[in-house]
Image (cartoon, grey):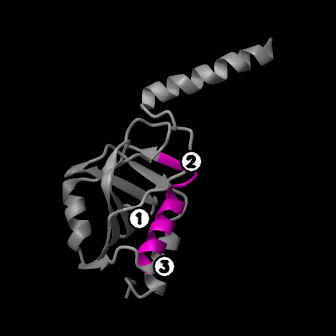
Amino acid sequence: MAGMAVIVLAPLIYLIIALNTGDLLWISPVFNYQPQTITIHCFGENVYLEYNSTEFDTMVELVNDSLTGRKRWDSISLSDATYQDYQSHPQMMVVELTYPEPIRVHSRYKFFSNVDRLIIPLVGRHTQSNAIFGRLNEYPAAGSFHVDDLSPLKNFLAESNLCAES
């Protein structure tokens, strides 16, 4: 009887979550997308990575690794004022990835489902919680994802002399 309950309930629970999120792959922990551009907002200066350069490819791999696996959604959203600060403030380091079409971060949450830009603060506001924000066109996505560790991104930027804290 218990085995039958599991056989019936497991697909039902999966289907309910899939309908709620609008994503049949909500259970997939994999994030594997190729951005069109990567901009590093480095303490008030912008660094643009050349598409398909070694640095570009390494950053894509590091971001995809960061978003693959366990992540937690939080209701903290990116305000327009903070987004503007991220782009030009002399005390902040932020990585911004722009995708050619909206992407989906698979999770059991409906929020943050389709974004065409990821904003990853590495120094400054929201860095303690390893937050990753999204935007669609010029509008912020609802909430943010929090990953286990963003230090590989920050370390790579410093080691490759792309952006480092003074």
* Distance from the alpha carbon under mark 2 to that under mark 1: 22 Å
- State the residue at coordinates (19%, 64%): 84
Q: Is residue 2 above or below residue 111?
A: above
Q: Nearer the viewer, mark 2 or mark 1?
A: 2
Does label 3 or label 2 sit earlier along the sequence?
Answer: 2
In the image, what residue type sits under mark 2? Pro
Which residue in the rendered view is the most extreme toward the top? 1
Question: Magenta stretch: dominant SS?
Answer: helix
In the image, what residue type sits under mark 3? Phe
Does the stretch in magenta take in 70? yes
- State the residue at coordinates (33%, 78%): 50
Q: Are marks 3 and 2 in contact (CB under 8 Å)?
A: no
* Distance from the alpha carbon under mark 3 to that under mark 1: 16 Å
The residue that disc 1 covers is 127
Q: Is residue 158 above or below residue 73?
A: below
Q: x%, y% of residue 67?
A: 50, 56
Could you say whether the residue bearing mark 2 is in a helix, strand or loop? loop
* Distance from the alpha carbon under mark 3 to that under mark 2: 23 Å
Q: x%, y% of residue 157?
A: 43, 80
Could you say whether the residue bearing mark 3 is in a helix, strand or loop? helix
Figure quadrant of residue 3: top right
Q: Nearer the viewer, mark 3 or mark 1?
A: 3
In the image, what residue type sits under mark 1? Thr
Quadrant of the snapshot with the N terminus: top right
Say if residue 42 shows up in the picture.
Answer: no
Say if residue 68 shows up in the picture.
Answer: yes
Q: x%, y% of residue 60?
A: 45, 67
Residue stretch rendered in magenta on the structure: 55-72
The residue that disc 3 covers is 156
The residue that disc 2 covers is 29
